[in-house]
Amino acid sequence: GDEYSGYRRVLLKLGGEMFGGGSVGVDPDVVGTVASQIADVVADGVEVAVVIGGGNFFRGAELQQRGMERARGDYMSMLGTVMNCLALQDFLEREHEIDTRVMSAITMGQVAEPYIPRRAMRHLEKGRVVIFGAGTGMPYFSTDTAAAQRALEIGAEVVLMAKGVDGVYTADPKTTPSAERFESITHREVLERGLKVADSTAFSLCMDNHMRILVFNLLEEGNIARAAGGARIGTLVST
Ligand code: UDP
């Protein structure tokens, strides 16, 4: 069913740019705010897995434009996502005393567990927040794709896609003031209208496997808990 109801297990996707607060690196104020919102969701009894982007450090495609090999740039970007994961882990554990595990798609045993799906699910069952780092571990992919894949594999009911806008619009609301927001829309209609919710690999993975995506505004205080609680915010993309 596509009805809104509180979720049991969610996959929260956070863009990296937001972690940087508009510049390169991490902005502890932003990370702290996100951590306290996640703590509210955990307190509500929802199992939370997180995928964080790396746009606040590097993007492989951008490094490529400046002369680097694409795959190497992508690996650099994936390493950047792990720094974001560690920052979030730090705030969750020290400010909110929430057990947190970072699981990396690229092995780096000193700072993160390797991504082992069944272990990830076990952590979630125990109420731990699981933060997936290093995307899919594969160049040419994105953290949106990692989010879709991890959500599917761990049995999350929805991808909560936190953005700087409050949903999917008929057109870009920044340039088209008359643009209207969808409360809900199907994956197919997103494609037919040429709208953008995630990159095409991530989006088709969700469409083919009936994974719901809730696009919502991260910048509004309390929205992560609202989204996880099944509130009618943002835009729900479902089949
Ligand atoms: N990346 C990759 N494979 C992955 C995930 C990420 O190669 O599975 C690289 C890619 O260069 C990407 C960058 O890491 O541009 C950062 O991820 P993304 O662009 O998804 O971050 P966001 O836009 O969410 O901050």
Image (tube, grey):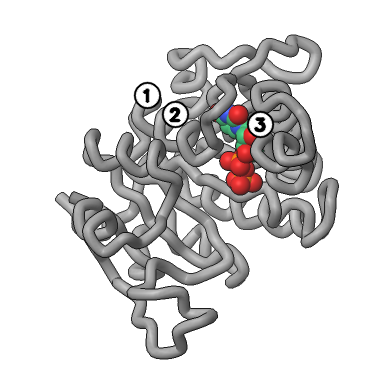
Q: Are marks 1 and 3 in contact (CB under 8 Å)?
A: no
Q: Nearest the camera: 105 or 97?
A: 105
Q: CA distance from mark 2 to mark 1?
A: 5 Å
Left or right of 93 on screen, residue 146: left
Above-or-below relation of 9 to 231: above
For label 1, the residue is: 153
Give the residue type that dot 1 points to.
Answer: Glu
Cβ of mark 2 under 8 Å from ligand 1: the answer is no
Quadrant of picture, ligand 1: top right
Q: Nearest the camera: 156 or 209?
A: 209
Q: CA distance from mark 1 to mark 3?
A: 21 Å
Q: Are marks 2 and 1 in contact (CB under 8 Å)?
A: yes
Give the residue type that dot 3 points to.
Answer: Asp
Q: CA distance from mark 3 to mark 2?
A: 20 Å
For label 2, the residue is: 150
Which mark is drawn over residue 99?
Answer: 3
Which quadrant holds residue 40? bottom right
Residue 97 in view here:
no
Local packing at callout 1 (Cα closer than 10 Å; few below 14, some 14-19, many 20+) is: few
Give the residue type that dot 2 points to.
Answer: Arg
